[in-house]
Image (tube, rainbow, N blue to C red):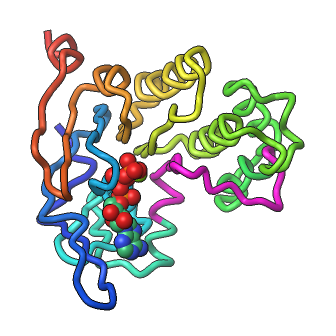
């Protein structure tokens, strides 16, 4: 099976005034293309940092990250941005919408960057899918937390990414909206073969993925297949 992402001995440290803080400590794992994976662990254990390194948003202090055969640690920021734009969707824990653009424009940005066609109608369609057709002209500040999260999701879907990273994608949503968003995530995996990597504190959501990696204090403490993987294999 094809490997879409491979980490080898990845560490991330931050230098503070008086000491070196190790946030990720020799993390290694690889991910099969088209699979679904969750990363779980206590607050502060390094999940968001790890996701950022996997997606090429940030650089490891040591070790290697290879995404779709491309060694990210060898690339400069511009090249990594190109790789992200081509292969990666990212749903941020804090949404990271552009405040001066409307919901619709936020969703259009990645498509515009790729010079695609019919982007307005496609962006509207994506907003409709996340239940926000009637909020398309609102600015982020005029949207609730859960609504901003859904715009962020529509934006991440806009390039039909090979890999979708989602940091607490249902963290701010009620049960019903959560279910709708989860369905969209897993549909994208089934229909487009998008590899899903989800950080979550929601163990029910984690159990819907094929594999769960647990991290604590920047180290992997467990890496297990779930019933989903078993039922897919038989
Ligand atoms: N730029 C930075 N400089 C110094 N320390 C940082 C920096 N960014 C993150 N950290 C530290 O790294 C640790 C891991 O942070 P991270 O955001 O990855 O945690 P997390 O597992 O996603 O937590 P949560 O579940 O609360 O979102 C935290 O202790 C945080 O304080
Ligand atoms: Mg986090």
Residue at x-position 14% and y-position 27%: 225
Q: Quadrant of the C terminus?
A: top left
Residue at x-position 18% and y-position 66%: 10
Q: Tell me if 177 is positioned left or right of 64 in this view.
A: right
- Asked if the stretch drawn in magenta spans residue 94, the answer is yes
**Residues rendered magenta in the picture:** 83-104
Q: Tell me if 215 is positioned left or right of 188 in this view.
A: left
On screen, residue 222 above or below 22: above
Total numbered labels:
0
Q: Which quadrant would residue 38 be assigned to in this image?
A: top left
Q: Tell me if 20 is positioned left or right of 147 in this view.
A: left
On screen, residue 48 above or below 169: below
- Asked if the stretch drawn in magenta spans residue 169, the answer is no
Q: Position of residue 2 (x, y in %)?
A: 21, 42
- Asked whether residue 68 is in view, the answer is no
Which is nearer the eye, 148 or 155?
A: 148
Looking at the image, the residue that sits furthest to the front is: 18
- Asked whether residue 197 is in view, the answer is yes
Q: Position of residue 224 (x, y in %)?
A: 12, 31
Q: Which quadrant would residue 75 be assigned to in this image?
A: bottom left
Q: Position of residue 195 (x, y in %)?
A: 36, 38
Which is nearer the eye, 202 or 69?
A: 202
Q: Position of residue 168 (x, y in %)?
A: 46, 40
Looking at the image, the residue that sits furthest to the bottom is: 17
Residue at x-position 59% and y-position 39%: 153
Which is nearer the eye, 187 or 172?
A: 172
On screen, residue 234 above or below 63: above
Q: Quadrant of the N terminus?
A: top left
């Amino acid at each position: 099976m094809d490997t879409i992402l491979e980490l080898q001995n990845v560490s991330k440290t931050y230098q503070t005034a008086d000491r070196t803080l190790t946030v990720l400590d020799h993390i290694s794992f690889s991910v099969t293309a088209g699979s679904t994976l969750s990363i779980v662990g206590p607050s502060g254990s390094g999940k968001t940092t790890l996701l950022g390194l996997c997606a090429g948003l940030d650089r490891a202090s040591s070790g290697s990250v290879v995404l779709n055969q491309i060694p990210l640690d060898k690339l400069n920021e511009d090249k990594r941005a190109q790789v992200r734009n081509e292969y990666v969707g990212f749903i941020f824990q804090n949404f990271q919408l552009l405040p001066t653009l409307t919901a619709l424009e936020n969703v259009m940005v990645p498509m515009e960057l790729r010079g695609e066609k019919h982007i307005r109608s496609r962006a509207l369609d994506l907003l409709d899918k996340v239940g926000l057709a009637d909020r398309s002209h609102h600015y982020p500040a005029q949207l609730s937390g859960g609504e901003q999260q859904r715009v962020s999701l529509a934006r991440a879907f806009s390039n039909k990414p090979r890999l979708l990273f989602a940091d607490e994608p249902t963290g701010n949503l009620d049960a019903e909206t959560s279910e709708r968003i989860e369905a969209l995530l897993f549909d994208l995996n089934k229909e487009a073969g998008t590899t899903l990597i989800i950080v979550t504190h929601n163990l029910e959501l984690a159990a819907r993925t094929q594999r769960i990696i647990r991290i604590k204090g920047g180290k992997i403490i467990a890496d297990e297949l779930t019933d989903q993987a078993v039922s897919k294999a038989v």
